[in-house]
Image (cartoon, rainbow, N blue to C red):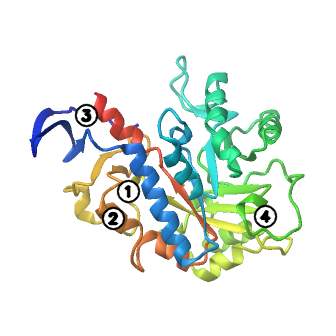
Amino acid sequence: MGKGSTLIYSLLIVMGGIFFFCTVRNEVVAADIQYKKEMVLLIEEISNYAKKKNPYFQVIGNGGLDLYRQENLDDALIKRLLNHLDGVLVEGRAYTWGKTEDDQAMHTMPTTPDAKDFIDSSLSLPVANHLPVFIVDYCQDHNQIDDAYRENRAKGYISFIGSPDLNTIPSYPRDLPWEFNKKISRLDQVHSFLILLNPGNFKSKEEYLRKLRNTNCDLLIIDRYFDNQPLSSADVASLRVRKNGTSRLVFAYLSIGEAENYRPYWQASWSTSPPAWIAEENPDWQGNFKVKYWTKEWKKVLFGSPRTLLDEIVKDGFSGVFLDVIDAYDYFENKQVM
């Protein structure tokens, strides 16, 4: 992930010790940083901080399957991660979105058996620790949708199936058979969910909120913003009541592995003179830049004062946060070995 760049390898002697380092854009990637461990520690900090403000606040981590595998992290560190998550989400277990060797156009396609086995084996520890597993698959054919729901449900996973842009409320299936008329207050009570991160297709905030309220899923995962303006606490409260009148969970999106130049925290000068903790732009997502997520500068963007991202999510009454780009360690580890 991330654009390839020319790396300049040098030898640095510090206090009698020798280690290699490489420059990436205007930053230094040191070989002694344990990137996976640093991501676990960041998630732990976020979870502890939010739950100190609201003990009922919950955290979902998206992807980062390497963090749950014992060949990558020791058992104690994996346990710490699992203790600070309330659920995990994985994309593309049955149907994914990408390119094939024969066709370089992006399209939906079945997940390969090897990839599916990797996903399931990586999820064994979260499942054993009783964390709910949420799956997002990408397909539009009704037979494929039925197949994905059936297959994931047989594994005990909770499914959402939609378009790769995550910009619509799917029209099929019209009514999920596992929608129940009961109060939902914890992730382990969830049987259905909707994830909608790009609301640009809706004509107005009012239409957007109305259509979300007209659903009965147990969990909504949404962006905190509509048309670059944050939803109000009243907006969020209205979404926590679903069509059947019972309460549900509403989670806000938060990227912790990339900075986004369309967010309010982005400073104009960063586009031409980025600070040292911002690395390269993600070639697959324009305006998204890899960050040194272990630095205090990035953490000050995420949480710690009233106007930071996590603090505002908690203040606005969201049930929890959906942490994205937790696999940012891949980018920095790949830079080390180039």
Q: Which residue is mark 2?
A: 266
Q: Quote the CA–CA distance across marks 2 and 3.
A: 24 Å
Q: Where residue 188 sits in the image (x, y, percent)?
A: 74, 58
Q: Residue at x 53, y 43 (%)?
A: 75
Q: Secondary structure at mark 4?
A: loop
Q: Which residue is mark 4?
A: 215
Q: Quote the CA–CA distance across marks 1 and 4.
A: 31 Å
Q: Amino acid at mark 1?
A: Ala
Q: Residue at x 18, y 36 (%)?
A: 19
Q: Which residue is mark 3?
A: 5
Q: Amino acid at mark 3?
A: Ser
The answer to whether the residue labelled 2 contacts the one labelled 1, judged by CB atoms less than 8 Å apart, is yes
Mark 1 or mark 4: which comes first in sequence?
Answer: 4
Asked if one can make out residue 98 in the rendered structure from this viewpoint, the answer is yes
Which residue extends farthest top? 102
Local crowd at mark 3 within 10 Å, few (<14), some, or many (≥20)?
few
Q: Secondary structure at mark 2?
A: loop
Question: Which of 170 and 275 lies nearest the eye of the viewer?
Answer: 275
Tell me where residue 141 sits by quadrant.
top right
Tell me where residue 184 sits by quadrant.
bottom right
Q: Quote the CA–CA distance across marks 3 and 4.
A: 45 Å
Q: Where residue 129 sits in the image (x, y, percent)?
A: 68, 49
Find residue 259 and name its label.
Answer: 1
Tally of marks: 4
Q: Secondary structure at mark 1?
A: strand
